[in-house]
Each structure stands twice: as structure tokens, then as C-alpha cells.
Image (cartoon, helix red, strand yellow):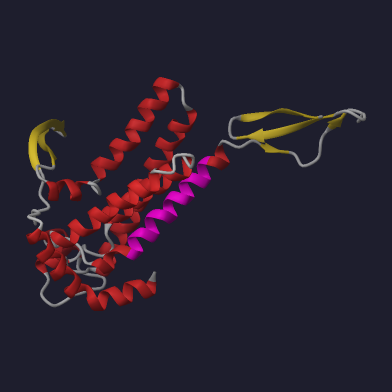
Amino acid sequence: MVLETAVLVEADQNITDRAYRLGDKLDLSHSSHQKSYAHLSIALAGKRLSLPIGGPDNIGTAMYFIGDGFTHFSIAGSFLAYGLAKHDNRAEQTASELTEAIITTGFATQLLKHITGRESPFVSTEPGGQWRIFPNQADYARHTPHYDAFPSGHMATAMATLTVISDNYPEYRFIKPVGYSMMTLLGFEMLNNKVHWASDYPLALALGETFAKIAVRKGRVETTQVKSPEPAVEKTETALSSVHIAPFASATGAGLSVAMRF
């Protein structure tokens, strides 16, 4: 990952320029802004806030929307709704793991953005963008695009979502090819609209996959009963079968396990 990032940093400006020209040939929008279709009014602390509800309105913004947080939380919500409606524990667990992976990935990428302070391509003041390690956080808040390129939160979130779903549904072999294809479109569009450099991706992919794997592993441990290695009571073994009764503890409480061997 470190080697890939270093190589791409050297080639970033050339890659971005080529992607931008290819976007022109394909007649893709260079804008990352979504169209506002409605507004959600919320009363907060005696004040009324108006939040725009937007979405893509062309192919370019649709490709960029693949990595939007709203997209991935909607996927998690869909798994939860299906799980509750169908009493499907796997779908409910997937929703929980997606939420955990998205939140932890988002936190990690934001922390690193606030540390590395890299310029986005569309505001870059030098080839490859300037790096301002440990930038002034007040300046960061006022001029965010000048500091928040590295790593890509969109790419990290997309990778986290794909990893959780593919690990929970390994029998559906189309998930990874479809997911990686969509992430390729996302990666190209973020070069085309000059939101990210290519070198912003390797660390983002590593973060997304890592936090997703942790969430999946944690979810499986919580739903697995931890059994005592030695049976407390054992019936006499016969030539045909044996029965083992042992206490166990799990996240939901204690009980007895019964194992029969034929």
C-alpha cells in the first residue's frame, strides 16, 4: 500500500489530467454537486434548519454518488428492513456490521484528513497538490478542499460496504465483480471531477477493508456460543453413540449444550 501510494504520488498530476480529458471525450460532468430535489426542515435548539435532500442528475454525478454516505447508510437500512420483515438474522447482522464499518471508517479517514492536509486537485496550487501536515484546524474548517484530499472517504466507505456484504453472503459470487466495477467508476469520476488524486485510494481501500473485516469478525464472535472445553457431565459411551453435556456462556447468557455423536 505504501509503495503504491508513493508511486502514484509521483504520477498524480498526469493521471488526473488524462482522466479529465477522457471525461471531456465521454461528455461526463466535471461537477461533484448533487441536484437538490427537496428540503427537510428540522427544529433544533429553537431554530429551524433546512437540510437539502439531493441526488445525482447526470451520469457523472451518479458515478460520484456511489461513494456517498447516504448511499451506504441506505444499503445498511435496506438490510435492516429486510431482516426485520423476514426475521432474517443474517440480514440484521449485516446491517449492524455495515453501520459499524461505515462509522469507524469515516472517523479514521476524517482523522487522517485533518492530519495530512492535502489539497484537492480542483484547488491545487502545485502539481500533485500541496501537503500541509497538521494544518491549522480553523483554516481547515474555512477552506476544507485545501486540506481534505487524503485519503478518500468515498472510496474507503465503498470498500467497507462491499467487504461486509461479500463476507456475509459468500454464496453470491457476483457481489465482488459488481462491487469492484462500481468502485472503478467511482474512482474514475473522482479523478474526472478533480475531487481526489489517484494516490488517495490505496490507503482508503486498506482502511475500508480493515474496518469491515473487524466488524464482521466482531459480529461473528458475538453470535457464537463459547463452550467449555471439558464436558461437565458425560454419559457412558457405547459403540454407536456418545452424549456430552457441558455448560456454556454467550453474549446472551449461560446454559447447557448437548452434543450427540453417532
Magenta part of the chain = 202-219
Give percent across and percent down for residue 72: 30, 42
| Residue drawn where x is 25% and y is 79% of the image | 10
Residue 178 against residue 191 in the figure, above or below: above
| Residue drawn where x is 11% and y is 36% of the image | 49
Give percent across and percent down for residue 23: 11, 60
Q: Is residue 152 magenta?
A: no
Q: Magenta segment, principal secondary structure?
A: helix
- Is residue 157 among what the camera can see? no
**Image quarter of the C terminus:** top right
Q: Is residue 207 magenta?
A: yes
| Residue drawn where x is 22% and y is 64% of the image | 149
Would residue 4 be found to the left or right of residue 58 on screen?
A: right
Would residue 165 be found to the left or right of residue 13 on screen?
A: right
- Is residue 88 among what the camera can see? yes
| Residue drawn where x is 14% and y is 62% of the image | 194
Would residue 176 be found to the left or right of residue 10 on screen?
A: right
Count up the numbered dots. 0
Give percent across and percent down for residue 41: 11, 31
Give percent across and percent down for residue 207: 38, 58
Residue in front for this viewpoint, 82 or 24: 24
Residue 117 against residue 94 in the figure, above or below: below
**Image quarter of the N terminus:** bottom left
